[in-house]
Image: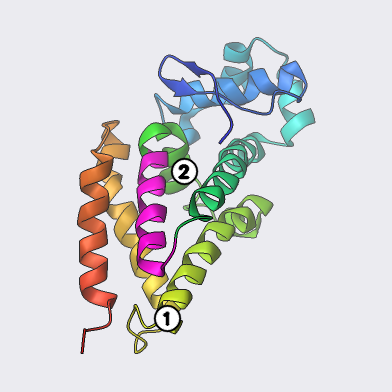
């Protein structure tokens, strides 16, 4: 995972090769969205906080929501290679699932602004589901689905539940488990949340012994 700078508790935009003005705009949005809802933020306010001309927002991101998607994509692009590397030497679907859950909860916990964008700000807008950022986010779901299918094929997980249903239940359970902390800006215990979710999932999908 890219080593990101942190300012006032907020991890910053990581694409250091981008033009300075673009980086300043992205970091300004991260700072603002930590304190208020996206719809309450104006492009003029972003420009003021970033210290750049408001026209640059439209030059680099087309509009305010394009900026939101770009910031989210930056975090997803950072996370996916990290989790794929973490899973390389893990054997067995059960252990892979636990590793994925721990890293996902840890990611949300350490990146509360990104978690807020993903869970609270983009999904209430239909255009998100047509955006490149959404298709990038789906790579995570595909990784989870692959683990589930591996577990079914190996006889670790039940084969009488559709894999995609299991995937959706896991994603929904994890997000709802973390949502109160995201809404109120509180960290959760990564280890205990992982164990709780893992135990609940495994009791439901693990193939009964014998």
Task: Identify the image quadrant of the N terminus.
Answer: top right
Choose top left, top right, bottom left or bottom right for residue 107.
top left
- For residue 164, say whether it is visible: no
The vertical placement of 86 against 29, above or below, is below
> Between 192 and 8, which is closer to the camera in this rendering?
192
> Between 179 and 101, which is closer to the camera in this rendering?
101
Q: Residue at x 69, y 36 (%)?
A: 63
Name the residue carrying label 2.
121
Name the residue carrying label 1.
154
Q: Is residue 209 left or right of residue 136?
A: left
> Between 167 and 72, which is closer to the camera in this rendering?
167
Task: Identify the image quadrant of the C terminus.
Answer: bottom left
From the image, state whether disc 1 or disc 2 is nearer to you.
1
* Element type at mark 1: loop
Reply yes or no: does residue 199 show up in magenta.
no
The vertical placement of 56 against 150, above or below, is above
Reply yes or no: does residue 104 show up in magenta.
yes
């Amino acid at each position: 995972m890219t080593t990101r700078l942190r300012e006032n508790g907020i991890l910053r935009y990581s694409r250091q090769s981008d033009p300075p003005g673009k980086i300043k705009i992205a970091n300004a949005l991260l700072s603002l969205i930590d304190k208020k809802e996206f719809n309450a933020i104006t492009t003029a306010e972003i420009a003021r906080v970033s210290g750049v001309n408001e026209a640059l927002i439209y030059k680099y991101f087309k509009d305010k929501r394009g900026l939101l998607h770009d910031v989210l994509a930056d975090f997803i692009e950072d996370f996916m290679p990290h989790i794929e590397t973490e899973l390389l030497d893990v054997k067995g679907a059960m252990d892979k699932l636990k590793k994925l859950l721990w890293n996902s909860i840890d990611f949300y916990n350490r990146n509360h602004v990104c978690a807020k964008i993903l869970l609270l700000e983009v999904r209430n807008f239909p255009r998100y589901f047509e955006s490149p950022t959404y298709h990038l986010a789906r790579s995570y779901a595909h990784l989870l689905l692959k683990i589930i299918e591996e577990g079914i094929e190996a006889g670790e997980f039940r084969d009488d539940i559709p894999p995609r249903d299991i995937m959706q239940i896991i994603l929904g359970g994890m997000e709802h488990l973390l949502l109160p902390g995201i809404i109120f800006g509180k960290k959760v215990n990564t280890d205990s949340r992982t164990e709780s979710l893992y135990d609940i999932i495994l009791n439901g999908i693990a193939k009964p012994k014998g």
